[in-house]
């Protein structure tokens, strides 16, 4: 029984490792947090079967990653892990969305009742597609803010960037995602497919 | 008089940045007021505002 559970958890190791690696950009640190997550999952009695095992494990992993980032923040670091940021800080590429007088070139569309999309697996497939189209650091920062729910100042400290840089990156992410979701879901065929 | 009032109006482009920043920092009273004034008159930005809020809710549902 317990062995069964351990084996089920083990099948998600590769996935957990990918998520951790994406966030921490450090193979050893990623393996550590995944190991901690597996141990916590095995020792705790928290899994009630209300969510999928994968979702439950992701929830534990999220806390372990946040802990790792906070710990790292307290240690002095020599090397910044945030590379090639400049190319992702250019806010002007969204100027095309606005006219010279600052009004929308084409207004955001009416999304109707978007809440019903939250219950659709296909919606999150489109979300994945849109997240993958973001520049890598932009996606990473957006995930730190919106999935791991880190505070702005924690992200700035972890990545050694200014608040202004952070706002620009998150603005980029939201503008791109909004546009991509609109095109591929709210105005695309996906939403109305059976 | 009217010109001074217009000078306080934000453009959609500025509003889009402010709406995004609202998710990451508290806006000042002055920023909130200007935002409200603009949203009252602009349906494009009102949609954008709702969509950015929705994006946050969607990400809360999201599991990588």
Image (tube, coloured by chain):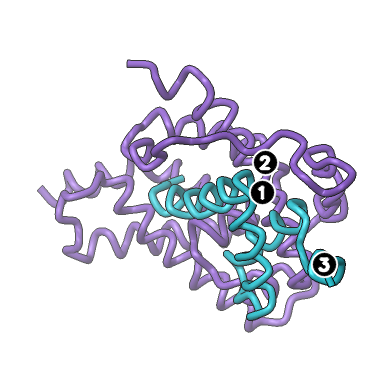
Chain colours: A purple, B cyan
Residue drawn at point x = 63 percent, y = 75 percent: B27
Q: Report the front residue among A4 and B48.
A: B48
Q: How far apart are the alpha carbons under marks 3 and 1? A: 36 Å
Say whether mark 1 and mark 3 are on the same chain.
no
Residues marked 3 and 2 touching at CB (< 8 Å): no
Mark 3 vs mark 2: in front:
3
**Residue position for label 2:** A176
Query: How many residues crowd mark 1 within 10 Å: few (<14), some (14–19), many (20+)?
Result: many
Residues marked 2 and 1 touching at CB (< 8 Å): yes
**Rendering quarter of residue B36:** bottom right
Mark 3 vs mark 1: in front:
3
**Residue position for label 3:** B2
Q: Secondary structure at mark 1?
A: helix
Subunit that carries the residue with mark 1: A
Q: Report the front residue among A15 and A105.
A: A105
Pinpoint residue A153: horizontal percent, then vertical percent. Answer: 64, 76
Query: How many residues crowd mark 3 within 10 Å: few (<14), some (14–19), many (20+)?
Result: few
Residue drawn at point x = 46 percent, y = 45 percent: B64
**Residue position for label 1:** A173
Query: How many residues crowd mark 2 within 10 Å: few (<14), some (14–19), many (20+)?
Result: some
Q: Is residue A8 visible?
A: yes
Residue drawn at point x = 38 percent, y = 36 percent: A117
Task: Using residue A5 as the reference point, say whether residue B43 is left or right of it.
Answer: right
Quarter of the rendering occupied by the N terminus of chain B: bottom right
Pinpoint residue A136: horizontal percent, then vertical percent. Answer: 70, 45
Subunit that carries the residue with mark 3: B
Residue drawn at point x = 63 percent, y = 83 percent: A74
* A125 w.r.t. A85: above or below: above
Q: How far apart are the alpha carbons under marks 3 and 2? A: 36 Å
Say whether mark 2 and mark 3 are on the same chain.
no
Task: Using residue A128 as the reference point, say whether residue A101 is left or right of it.
Answer: right
């Amino acid at each position: 029984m317990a062995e069964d559970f351990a084996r089920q958890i083990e099948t998600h190791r590769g996935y957990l490792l990918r998520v951790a690696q994406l966030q921490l950009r450090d193979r050893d640190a990623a393996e550590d947090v995944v190991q901690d997550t597996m141990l916590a999952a095995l020792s705790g009695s928290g899994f009630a079967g209300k969510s999928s095992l994968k979702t439950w494990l992701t929830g534990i992993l999220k806390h372990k990653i946040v802990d790792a980032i906070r710990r790292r923040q307290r240690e002095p670091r020599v090397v910044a892990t945030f590379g090639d940021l400049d190319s992702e800080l250019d806010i002007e590429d969204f100027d095309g969305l606005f006219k010279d007088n600052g009004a929308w070139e084409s207004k955001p569309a009416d999304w109707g009742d978007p809440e019903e999309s939250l219950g659709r697996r296909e919606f999150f497939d489109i979300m994945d597609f849109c997240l993958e189209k973001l520049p890598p650091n932009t996606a990473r920062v957006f995930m730190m803010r919106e999935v791991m729910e880190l505070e702005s100042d924690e992200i700035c400290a972890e990545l050694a960037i200014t608040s202004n840089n952070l706002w620009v990156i998150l603005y980029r992410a939201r503008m791109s995602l909004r546009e991509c979701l609109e095109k591929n879901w709210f105005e695309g065929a996906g939403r109305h497919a059976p | 008089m009217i010109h001074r009032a217009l000078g306080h109006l934000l453009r959609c482009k500025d509003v889009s940045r402010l709406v995004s920043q609202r998710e990451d920092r508290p806006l000042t009273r002055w920023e909130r007021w200007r935002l409200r004034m603009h949203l009252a008159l602009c349906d494009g930005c009102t949609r954008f505002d709702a969509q950015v809020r929705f994006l946050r809710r969607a990400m809360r549902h999201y599991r990588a």
